[in-house]
Amino acid sequence: MKSIDELIFTEKTKKIIVEEQRVEVKSNISEPEQIAEVQEANVPLIDKNEKPAIIPRNIRPKDLFSYLRRKEVKKIVFFVFANDEEDFTNTIERLMDCHSYKEASEILKAVFTSYKISPYSKEAITFTNAVSNYFRQA
């Protein structure tokens, strides 16, 4: 398992590239016969030029780690997550999957409650501010 530093700071930004894969199906049946079979099966026809509908998560230009310095991450992991790097990483992923700050704040609230951390502690405020800034970006 990689350390938290290797996960966060080796690759600051990653580009997500979605490649469309096309599969060619060869058949001995002519195209009009295939269309008739598809229509009989009540399966809607798909236009070959139509791109598949992909529902992406809210991909923001910067990730959440860009709002935290290495020193702050280490303090948050130590004080808020009781040195549980895996839970910290999972929480960051869940926060980045949220669609709004309101949704993310519920996760933060649950984390602070489960680790019995005051949401007004220095590290909790740093973490909350980073999450808030992440959701404010355009």
Image (tube, rainbow, N blue to C red):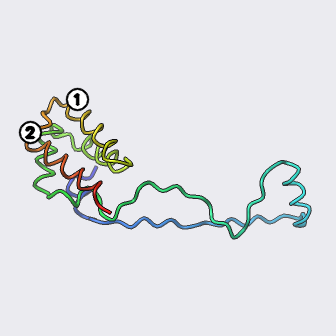
Q: What's the CA distance linking mark 1 and mark 2?
A: 15 Å
On the image, which quarter does residue 67 sit in?
bottom left
Density class for disc 1 (Cα within 10 Å; few <14, some 14-19, many ≥20) is few
Tell me: 114 left or right of 60. left
> Mark 1 against mark 2, which lies toward the viewer?
2
Residue located 90% across and 66% down the image: 30
Residue located 28% across and 49% down the image: 1
Q: Earlier in the sequence, mark 1 or mark 2?
A: 1
Residue located 12% across and 52% down the image: 72
Vertical relation: 108 (above or below) 134: above
Density class for disc 2 (Cα within 10 Å; few <14, some 14-19, many ≥20) is few
Q: Which amino acid, mark 1? A: Ser
Q: Which mark is residue 114?
A: 1
Residue projecting furthest to the left: 122
Vertical relation: 72 (above or below) 122: below
Rendered location of residue 114, percent (x, y): 22, 29
Rendered location of residue 68, percent (x, y): 17, 56
Q: Which mark is residue 121?
A: 2
Give the quarter of the figure containing the C terminus. bottom left
On the image, which quarter does residue 32 sit in?
bottom right
On the image, which quarter does residue 7 sit in?
bottom left
Q: Secondary structure at mark 1?
A: helix
Q: Which amino acid, mark 2? A: Ser
